[in-house]
Image (cartoon, rainbow, N blue to C red):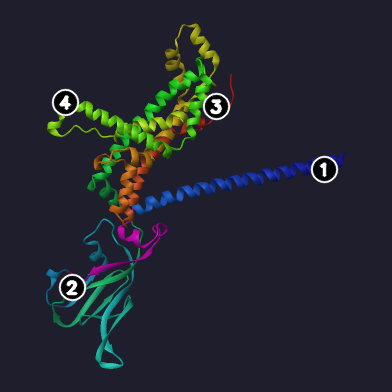
């Protein structure tokens, strides 16, 4: 008896240890997934808040600690050429004079000295040298002794009164972290393309989210609670459309829109005097074409999710409503829609994120004119416009991400409930 109890206790201990290890592994995997997702987002935000020099010369992980960066400064302005024997100044004041938005602070480590000195091997000639001069060491700059301190103060001493020309020097500074919003100001206010792209994205995304959800909700109710010939086969056909690749449908879609645009152009020529103003041509690529295309691509999944949710609602509610004399439209609007909010909100998140971040459909189906391009296409174009200006590119990317994040956070309480739609079989 005791042996059986000991064996059972050992099995229980082993099972407990296995569960603990399994739980720990799950936590590690989840932490790794969060880390993989969070790091790129932090990198985008950090780089967008840094200066152009800092974003080009050092990785984003160095933005939170002092980092050695090179800066060029001039000893004085051209109009300050007064005769003197001693000139004083501060390197940080000179650096921050023209661009105070990202003030440079920290400790000056060294200055790159470039100049000619007598050749030790040939006194009649000079040689060009480059060396890093530390703080406190005097260097010969245009006949005067130039010395600087770590706090940026410098003194330029001459043997006799002279009016020195400005000298540009390269200082290496252990720079303190500094952040600013200049990239966002430039992208949003100095570049009209980004605000136009935001407006265009809203014009495309909002209807392309509302239209398929509305149609799919009606269709899902019909598949769930209405009886008509071929209902099950029609539902299978609709669901099977989910496997059709998006790229495969581009050719017939483009041909269809081109035919509609040609027909509309001919009709406009017949009904109006547009030839006088040369405005007869109807574009085959427009916001309407994007609405129709996104709606068509979203319908199969939307109908599938909503039908699985609606079919598991309590049958008694619908039977009671029918006994009270409610028709299908009243049942749908007053019972089905309020109870289906989690599923509707869940698919709204999916559809909004997909349409907002879509590039390929907008590239082939959307309008081509500069003012109507959606944000993903504008962001792609900025790769050539901004080139190596990473802070501007990242600022645009962060702006593009803010709206989906707000939508997701505002509706995330419905997200899990919507994902579980249809997972439990009900009456």
As drawn, the label of residue 272 is 4
Q: Earlier in the sequence, mark 2 or mark 1?
A: 1
Crowdedness of circle 1 by 10 Å Cα count: few (<14), some, many (20+)?
Answer: few
The mark total stands at: 4
Q: Nearer the viewer, residue 94 or 62?
A: 62
In contact (CB < 8 Å): disc 3 and disc 2: no
As drawn, the label of residue 201 is none
Crowdedness of circle 2 by 10 Å Cα count: few (<14), some, many (20+)?
Answer: some
Q: Quadrant of residue 355?
A: top left
Badge 3 is on which residue?
Answer: 422
In contact (CB < 8 Å): disc 2 and disc 4: no
Residue placed at 27% from the left, 65% from the top? 92
Marks 3 and 2, how far apart at CA = 76 Å
Nearer mark to the viewer, of 2 and 4: 4
Badge 1 is on which residue?
Answer: 6
Is residue 7 shown left or right of residue 295?
right
Marks 4 and 3, how far apart at CA = 53 Å
Magenta segment boundaries in residue numbering = 49-76
Q: Position of residue 314 (x, y in %)?
A: 54, 17
In contact (CB < 8 Å): disc 4 and disc 3: no
Q: Position of residue 279 (x, y in %)?
A: 17, 33
Q: Position of residue 132 (x, y in %)?
A: 33, 76
Badge 2 is on which residue?
Answer: 166
Q: Secondary structure at mark 2?
A: loop
């Amino acid at each position: 008896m005791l042996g059986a109890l000991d064996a059972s206790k050992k099995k229980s201990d082993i099972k407990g240890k296995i569960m603990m290890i399994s739980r720990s592994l799950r936590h590690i995997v989840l932490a790794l997934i969060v880390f993989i997702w969070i790091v790129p987002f932090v990198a985008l935000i950090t780089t967008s808040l840094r200066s152009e020099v800092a974003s080009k010369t050092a990785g984003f992980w160095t933005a939170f600690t002092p980092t050695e960066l090179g800066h060029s400064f001039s000893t004085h302005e051209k109009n300050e050429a007064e005769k003197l024997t001693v000139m004083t100044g501060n390197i940080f004041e000179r650096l921050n004079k023209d661009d105070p938005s990202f003030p440079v602070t920290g400790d000056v480590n060294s200055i790159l000295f470039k100049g000619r000195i007598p050749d030790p091997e040939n006194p009649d000639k000079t040689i060009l040298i480059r060396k890093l001069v530390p703080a406190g060491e005097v260097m010969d700059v245009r006949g005067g002794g130039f010395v600087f301190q770590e706090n940026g103060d410098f003194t330029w001493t001459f043997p006799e009164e002279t009016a020195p020309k400005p000298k540009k020097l390269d200082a290496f500074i252990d720079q303190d972290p500094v952040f600013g919003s200049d990239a966002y100001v430039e992208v949003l206010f100095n570049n009209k393309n980004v605000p136009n792209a935001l407006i265009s994205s809203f014009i495309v995304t909002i209807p392309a989210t509302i239209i398929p959800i509305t149609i799919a909700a009606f269709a899902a109710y019909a598949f769930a609670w209405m009886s008509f010939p071929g209902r099950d086969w029609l539902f299978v056909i609709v669901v099977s459309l989910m496997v059709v690749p998006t790229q495969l449908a581009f050719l017939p879609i483009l041909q269809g829109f081109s035919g509609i645009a040609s027909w509309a152009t001919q009709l406009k020529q017949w009904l109006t005097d547009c030839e006088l103003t040369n405005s007869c041509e109807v574009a085959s690529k427009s916001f309407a074409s994007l609405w129709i295309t996104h709606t068509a691509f979203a319908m199969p999944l939307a109908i599938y999710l909503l039908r699985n949710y609606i079919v598991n609602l309590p049958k008694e509610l619908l039977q009671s409503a029918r006994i009270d004399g409610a028709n299908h439209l009243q049942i749908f609007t007053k019972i089905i829609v309020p109870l289906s909010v989690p599923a509707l909100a869940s698919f709204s998140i999916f559809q909004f994120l997909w349409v907002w971040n879509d590039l390929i459909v907008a590239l082939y189906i959307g309008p081509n004119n500069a003012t109507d391009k959606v944000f993903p296409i504008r962001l792609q174009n900025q790769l050539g416009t901004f080139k190596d200006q990473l802070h501007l590119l990242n600022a645009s990317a962060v702006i593009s991400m803010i709206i989906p994040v707000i939508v997701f956070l505002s509706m995330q309480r419905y997200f899990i409930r919507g994902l579980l739609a249809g997972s439990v079989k009900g009456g």
